[in-house]
Image: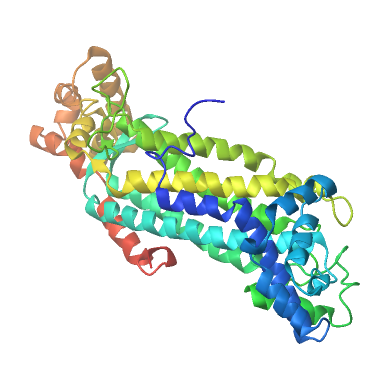
């Protein structure tokens, strides 16, 4: 297969976050997390007198990827067709004096893999949170800088009423703030391990089973669940949907940046570095490639969400055909979201806001977008419904005859009876009809300044 991957393109993905995310979900780190769990288990069992201390010390010492004979482990995998046993045997082989016999004492494969993947998710979430913080600060700066920058608000794809760019951005930031709250709530439920044995009853973990679980998970910095969650995958579904919700916000933002970049609108432009090329054949183009890439990857991520809820459908106490889906779905969601966030951090941190073009676009419809404002001005004299009819008639007439709103208003005796030309000019100044947008932005930024996402 040939072509440039949207996940690998160095111009389109930040080198830090995407590479770090890849490292978290690489084979080496996955195996290392399994080894970390095995080491934590051995230490806990030694402390409780279940296995010899010298065995736990040796297991902990050798529970590092560098001690693993990967050729041996790969050969064992081909032979056993098992996801974890080859690594357990690899750790056993690495331990001296036959002390490896005490590796994996009393636990089952799902204990190690579930706890290990939670450790990976915990690492991955730190990157997501850091990227969200950086983007949130960029949005807060944009909102403050452009709280008074008038632009056209659009509904159902058409020009509606004036807003400010700062108000638009503040709404984006408010979404990110709620997403960050969701992450903090999720973390309380997500960061738990599993040391419960083959069917969750702890039958193989001795009379000190609860203490084994507690000490093992404490060693790993994880919490203890209230009961086995081997067939209960709601935590992971929640994780996927929280990440998917974040993705949906950035899908919207990136798509809006693309639309606002269109030459016919031309109100913003993403950063375009010296030497960057927009097209191989059209030298004039400055394509919004980074925002486009964010939308592309974001759209791909949604496919994983479509089948995520299926991971809850475990048959009986464990179901491998369902369980193993997680190993693909959730790491891919993290990886794709990291690309989306890297792209959006690049685009939003140095976004070019074209105030003059925003102002020009406010007048594209020759004043007709201020019809609401004129209607309310006339309603004091005629009443709202009658005023609506007067303005509607003039708006339709002007649009059909290709006249400006001012021209048709001045030609209507009913309007001139109430409003002078100077008053009409003031009413048709779009920059003065942004409502309370600047004040609302200030109030919002004051409310959010102590939020966790901006700390």
- Position of residue 360 in the picture relative to residue 300 (left or right): left
Q: Where is residue 148 in the image (x, y as percent from the top left)?
A: 21, 49
Q: Nearer the viewer, residue 441 or 262?
A: 262
Q: Which of 279 and 97 is in front in this view?
A: 97
Q: Position of residue 47 (x, y in %)?
A: 75, 86
Q: Which quarter of the picture shows residue 406? A: top left
- Position of residue 24 in the picture relative to residue 10 (left or right): right
Q: Which of 16 and 169 is in front in this view?
A: 16
Q: Position of residue 299 (x, y in %)?
A: 53, 35
Q: Is residue 12 above or below residue 45?
A: above
Residue located 30% across and 56% down the image: 441
The single residue placed furthest to the left in the displayed view is 422
Q: Which colour scheme is used?
A: rainbow
Residue 436 can be seen in this image: no
Q: In which quarter of the image is the C terminus?
A: bottom left
Q: Is residue 90 above or below residue 223?
A: above
- Position of residue 35 in the picture relative to residue 361 (left or right): right
Q: Position of residue 341 (x, y in %)?
A: 44, 48
The single residue placed furthest to the front in the displayed view is 97
Residue located 57% across and 26% down the image: 1
Residue located 25% across and 28% down the image: 368
- Position of residue 408 in the picture relative to residue 43 (left or right): left
Q: Which quarter of the picture shows residue 198? A: bottom right
Please state the total of marks drawn on the protein image.
Answer: 0
């Amino acid at each position: 297969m040939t072509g440039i991957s949207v996940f690998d393109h160095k111009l389109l993905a930040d080198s830090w976050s995407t590479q770090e995310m890849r490292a978290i979900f690489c084979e080496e780190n996955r195996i290392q997390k399994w080894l970390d769990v095995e080491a934590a288990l051995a230490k806990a069992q030694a402390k409780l007198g279940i296995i010899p201390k010298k065995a736990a010390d040796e297991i902990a010492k050798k529970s590092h990827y560098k001690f693993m004979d990967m050729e041996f482990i790969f050969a064992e995998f081909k032979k056993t067709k098992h996801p974890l046993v080859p690594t357990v045997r690899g750790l056993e082989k690495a331990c001296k004096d036959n002390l490896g016999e005490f590796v994996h004492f009393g636990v089952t494969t799902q204990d190690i893999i579930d706890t290990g993947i939670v450790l990976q998710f915990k690492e991955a979430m730190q990157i997501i949170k850091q990227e969200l913080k950086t983007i949130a600060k960029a949005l807060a700066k944009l909102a403050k800088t452009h709280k008074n920058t008038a632009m056209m608000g659009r509904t159902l794809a058409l020009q509606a009423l004036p807003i400010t760019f700062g108000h638009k951005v503040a709404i984006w930031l408010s979404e990110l703030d709620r997403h960050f709250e969701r992450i903090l709530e999720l973390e309380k439920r997500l960061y738990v391990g599993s040391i419960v044995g083959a069917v969750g009853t702890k039958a193989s973990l001795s009379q000190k089973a609860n203490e084994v679980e507690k000490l093992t998970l404490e060693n790993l910095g994880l919490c203890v669940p209230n009961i086995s969650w081997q067939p209960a995958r709601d935590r992971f579904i929640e994780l996927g949907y929280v990440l998917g919700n974040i993705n949906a916000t950035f899908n919207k933002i990136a798509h809006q940046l693309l639309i606002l970049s269109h030459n016919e609108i031309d109100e913003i432009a993403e950063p375009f570095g010296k030497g960057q090329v927009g097209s191989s054949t059209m030298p004039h183009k400055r394509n919004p490639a980074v925002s486009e890439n964010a939308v592309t990857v974001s759209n791909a991520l949604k496919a994983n969400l479509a089948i995520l809820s299926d991971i809850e459908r475990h048959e009986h106490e464990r179901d491998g055909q369902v369980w193993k889906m997680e190993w693909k779905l959730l790491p891919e969601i993290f990886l794709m979201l990291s690309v989306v966030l890297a792209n959006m951090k690049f685009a939003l941190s140095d976004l070019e806001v074209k105030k003059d073009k925003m102002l020009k676009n406010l007048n594209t419809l020759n004043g007709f977008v201020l019809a609401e404002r004129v209607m309310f001005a006339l309603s004091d004299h005629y009443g709202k419904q009658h005023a609506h009819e007067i303005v509607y008639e003039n708006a339709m007439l002007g649009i059909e005859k290709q006249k400006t709103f001012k021209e048709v208003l001045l030609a209507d005796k009913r309007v001139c009876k109430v409003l002078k030309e100077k008053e009409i000019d003031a009413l048709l100044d779009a920059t003065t009809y942004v409502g309370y947008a600047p004040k609302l932005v200030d109030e919002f930024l004051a409310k959010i300044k102590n939020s966790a996402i901006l700390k």
